[in-house]
Each structure stands twice: as structure tokens, then as C-alpha cells.
Image (tube, rainbow, N blue to C red):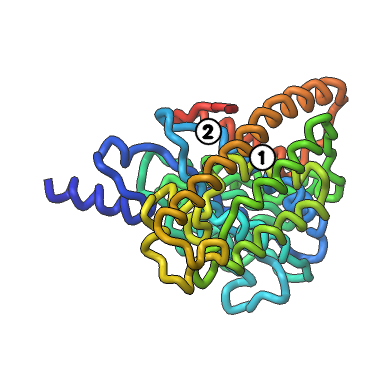
Amino acid sequence: MKKIAQRICQGIIVFGLSFTSFSQNQNGNIQIAILFDTSNSMDGLIEQAKSRIWKIVNTMSTLRYNGQIPKIEIALYDYGNDNITSNKDFVRQILPLTGDLDLISQKLFGLTTRGGSEYCGAVISYSVKELEWSSNPNSMKMIYIAGNEPFNQGTLNYKEVMKTAVKQNIQVNTIYCGDYQKGINEFWYDGSQLGKGEYSNINSNIVVKHYDTPYDQKIRAFNDSLNRTYYGFGVEGKMKKESQAFEDKNAVMQSAEAITERAIVKSKKVYNNAKWDIVDASMEDSTRILKLKEEELPAELKGKNEKEKLEFIESKKVEREKYQKMIQELSVKRDENINEQKTNDVNPEADFGEEIKKNVLKNAEVKGFKVELK
């Protein structure tokens, strides 16, 4: 009995949530670590990732486990870059597992390339050992490593590293940036098989193909309205609100499709900013606003009494939900339109985001997750 209690406690620590029963603790969550080769030849890979990050998140946000929305966490590493110290095998943790989607975007858009030594075994080893992987057997735990140099470089034996990952039920998928057979010859296929994952290859130099639809402009307009329902509080509030706007701009600069996909993510529960936004915080704790000191409040709430504060928050909650619903409804129509356009594509080339999307959906089915588009 004592061991069972300890196990439940461990689950609560890992997920950062409060559970009222053991069965609730068994709901699956999603953890993904993406390991980027950032040597000189990988500029195209990074650009594809920037274009597709919101599509990847959108794919994960459609998944449900036992009808529940899973917690989604993403970690970022880069390797093979001379700007990284050789003391850690040219491996750098950009971001630990986190659900802060704006921060993930910020760090991804900050990646730069430079020549270096690419040690695949090392970067996988660091990600397995350093990250706080879930102990829940129902969770999806996946590593995606992308690059184009021989997989067996470095002092760490990738075969031993894969054994360590598999023991923790972490699946390792490899994405070779180059010719399919060359990737096999350079052990990327072998790595995926030992990691109980999948091997694929992409042309990292192609520009991601985007699809325009009649619904994109409306979605982006509702995104602007959605932004006006966020009110930062506390020390981080102003900074995180500015970061939200900045990551919108990053997406806009990448492509029209990227900002549309980002807006769709922001219309879903997976985009939760309870740590800095008073509306999200109040949804988790309706009295949160009443616990803040005057100096911690957003300007719009300073000087108001308790009743006025609660009424203001409620009005913004209703307003936000209205725009979120509008975006979600348009998103369904947009997906239908894109699927129609894709039927006319002849042998479309795979890109980084599409490969991860396909793999996530395939593994989700195996783990018992269901897709729910609305």
C-alpha cells in the first residue's frame, strides 16, 4: 500500500497537476524532445521547423486520452555547433520539457547554425538523462533527432544509449536530412530500430509548401481580437504579454500559414497562460485576482473593488471564449479546404513538420489516444 501511495505522489510531481484519484493519474500525456543538428548545412532544417512548429502543436492538441485533453510538453536541444562547448560533446539544452508554447517559439526562432561535430549518441543521451520524463505508462514519450552526418560519431555508443532510452519507454525517431539510402548507410535507420522508433528522410533545403484558404484572413483577425483579452499580472505579466505579441510577429514573418496555425493553437486549451494572464489564472482559481497585491494587478484592474474585478474578468472570459469558438469553427473548414487542395498534389515532398505529424498520429493510435478535431 505504501508503494502505491508513493507511486501516486510521484505522478503528481511529474505532471504538476492535482489528482483526486489513481485512475485520473493514469490519463496519458505527451512529451516530445526535438534534437536539432545546427551545423552549417542545417539552415533549411531550422527554417522548416519554424514554419511547422504550430502545425506540430496543433496535431498534438487534437489528441485525447480517455476523453481528456493531455498535457503537452516540448523540449529543445541542439548539437553539432561550434558555439557549444566541447565539454558537453557539443550538445546544448535549449529548453527543458515545458508547456509554455510562446517560450518554445522564442527559443526555436533564436537558433542559429555554425560548423561543428555532430554526436547523435551524445545528444540523445543528454536528453534522456536530463529531462523530467513521465513515469506514467500511458504517456507518449518521444525523441525526434534530425541531422545529416553519420549517426555513430562521438565517444558515446549510440547502441548503448538507445537501450537506456527504451528502458524508460522513450521512443527515439530519426529524421535524416538527405538521401534515404545514405541515411541507412550512416546508421540513422539502425538508430531508429534500436530506439523502437521510425526512420525517415527529408530534403531539408526545400521551402515548405503552404496552402492558402478563404478562412485564413478571418482567423488572423480573430487572433488580434483574442490578444486583447489577455491581461498580464505580477512580475512576468508585462514581459510575457509582450512575448506573446512578439511570437505572433515571428510567425507572420515566417509565413501566412504559420500565423494562422499559431492562432488556431491559441484558440485551444493547450494554450494556457495561467502563470501570467489573469483570465487564465482565474479559470483555475476564481479567487486568484483577489489574492493579488495592488501593484501586481494589470492597469485595467487597479483601484477597482472586488465586485468590479470579478465582473471585468468574467466579461473578458466570455469575450475570449467567443473568439476561440469562432477560430475553431473556421479551422475545421480550413482543414477541409486544405485536404481538397492536397488531393491535387503529385508526390509532394516530405518536410520536417509533416514527418513529425505523421509519426505522432501513428504512435498516438498505438498508445490509445483518439483524434478529436473540435
Residue at image coords 81%, 49%: 204
Foreground pick, 309 / 237 = 309
- Count all numbered tags in the image, as a single digit: 2
Q: Which residue is mark 2?
A: 63
Residue 64 picture location, percent across and down = 48, 32
Q: Secondary structure at mark 2?
A: strand
Q: Secondary structure at mark 1?
A: helix
Which residue reaches farthest left? Answer: 1
Left-right relation of 290 to 123: left
The vertical placement of 333 against 168, above or below, is: above
The vertical placement of 366 against 90, above or below, is: above
Q: Which residue is mark 1?
A: 264
Residue at image coords 50%, 27%: 370
Residue at image coords 87%, 25%: 346
Q: Dividing the image into 4 quarters, which one contains the N terminus?
A: top left
Foreground pick, 192 / 315 = 315
